[in-house]
Amino acid sequence: MNNLDTTYLLAITGVVFAVNYALRGFVFAAFGGGKRPPAVILYVGSVISPAVISMLIVYCLRGAKFLAAPYGVPELTASAVCVVLHLWKRNPLLSIIVSTVVYMVLVQNLAG
């Protein structure tokens, strides 16, 4: 990698850092100091996790082959783990990580 590539990558990293920092700071500036967020923000916050998990399940199942081995077992099992874990623990990150691990283990071990 030459010097121009390194400079380019450092510039991209700097821009991404600045934009990310500014966006995160905006939230605290807009809603900090004990202000209550608008109702629409509270609503979006309450429905975003189930929406993302639903979208991940649909994405996972869209390519499943139910008529050929392993007959969609990894996809259906990981989906069930995701839903049950989310309903039980109400922790989206835990649900996504555990179901992804389950899916990857099953795909690697059941692939023919």
Image (cartoon, rainbow, N blue to C red):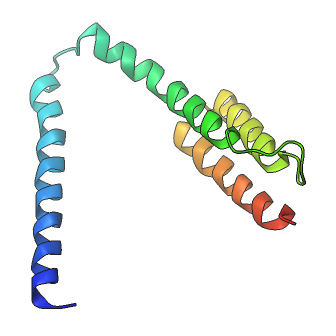
> Where 58 falls versus 99 (above or below)?
above
Q: Give whichever of 34, 78 is nearer the camera.
A: 78
> Where 66 falls versus 54 (above or below)?
below
> Where 53 falls versus 31 (above or below)?
below
Q: Is residue 65 visible?
A: yes
Answer with the quarter of the image where residue 41 lies: top left
Answer with the quarter of the image where residue 87 lies: top right
Q: Which quarter of the rendering shows the C terminus?
A: bottom right
Q: Is residue 33 visible?
A: no
- 71 sits to left or right of 38: right
Q: Residue at x 65, y 43 (%)?
A: 60
> Where 110 falls versus 29 (above or below)?
below
- 28 sits to left or right of 89: left
Q: Residue at x 73, y 32 (%)?
A: 84
Residue 9 pos. (x, y %) = 17, 73
Residue 24 pos. (x, y %) = 19, 41
Q: Which quarter of the rendering shows the N terminus?
A: bottom left
Residue 30 pos. (x, y %) = 11, 25
